[in-house]
């Protein structure tokens, strides 16, 4: 499932778009974040292009962006989103923990970098940090 999700009753919640090509991982992230009272997943994308489209359509506070996405990689998508809508924070997710990946993510405009697998606590802390920063 990709696209906008239910956006009713958002209040002051942190609005999230999840951009992850693995349907299972995307589903798990959405379910995990569903337990957080102050976070609402408003959309999900399976490609970099879909992530950009949803960013412009939904104007989330934070995008969780996998670094390796089809059609357009997560770093390119992040760069395009942050150039046009700098108020959207992007958290890059990757299985790669090399310093060069962290550096490239930050150069693309990402607010932080999470190495998979990460804990629910790490994810929520990164989202809160990113939402406060932008």
Image (cartoon, rainbow, N blue to C red):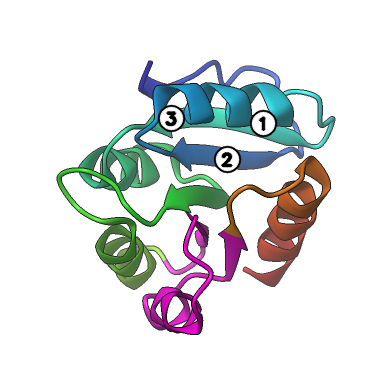
Stretch in magenta: 86-114
Disc 2 crowd, CA 10 A, few/some/many (<14, 14-19, 20+): many
Can you identify the residue that label 1 sits on? Answer: 40
State the residue in front, 46 or 22: 22
> Which disc number belongs to residue 16?
2
Marks 3 and 2, the one that precedes in the sequence: 2
Q: Which residue is mark 3?
A: 44
Q: Is residue 106 magenta?
A: yes
In the rendering, at what x and y percent does residue 134 appear? 62, 68
Q: Work out whether residue 108 or residue 66 is closer to the camera in this orientation and state it.
A: 66
Image marks 2 and 1: residues in contact by CB distance under 8 Å: yes
In what element is the residue under mark 1? strand
127 lies above or below 42: below
Crowding near the residue tagged with mark 1, few <14, some 14–19, many ≥20 C-alpha atoms within 10 Å: many
Q: Is residue 10 visible?
A: no
Task: Answer few, some or many: residues within 10 Å of disc 3's Cα (few below 14, many 20 plus, some between 14 and 19).
Answer: many
What is the quadrant of residue 47 in the picture?
top left
Q: Position of residue 50 (x, y in %)?
A: 26, 37
Q: Is residue 116 left or right of residue 38?
A: left
Q: Is residue 75 visible?
A: yes
């Amino acid at each position: 499932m990709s696209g906008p999700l239910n956006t009713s009753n958002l209040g002051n919640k942190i609005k999230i778009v999840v951009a992850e090509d693995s349907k299972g991982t995307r589903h798990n992230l959405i379910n995990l974040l569903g337990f957080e009272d102050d976070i609402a997943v408003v959309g999900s994308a399976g490609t970099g292009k879909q992530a950009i489209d949803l960013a412009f359509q939904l104007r989330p506070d934070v995008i969780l962006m996998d670094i390796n996405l089809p059609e357009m990689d997560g770093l390119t998508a992040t760069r395009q989103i942050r150039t046009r809508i700098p108020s959207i924070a992007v958290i890059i997710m990757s299985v790669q923990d090399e310093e060069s990946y962290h550096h490239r993510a930050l150069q693309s405009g990402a607010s932080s970098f999470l190495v998979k697998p990460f804990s629910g606590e790490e994810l929520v802390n990164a989202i809160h940090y990113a939402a406060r920063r932008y």
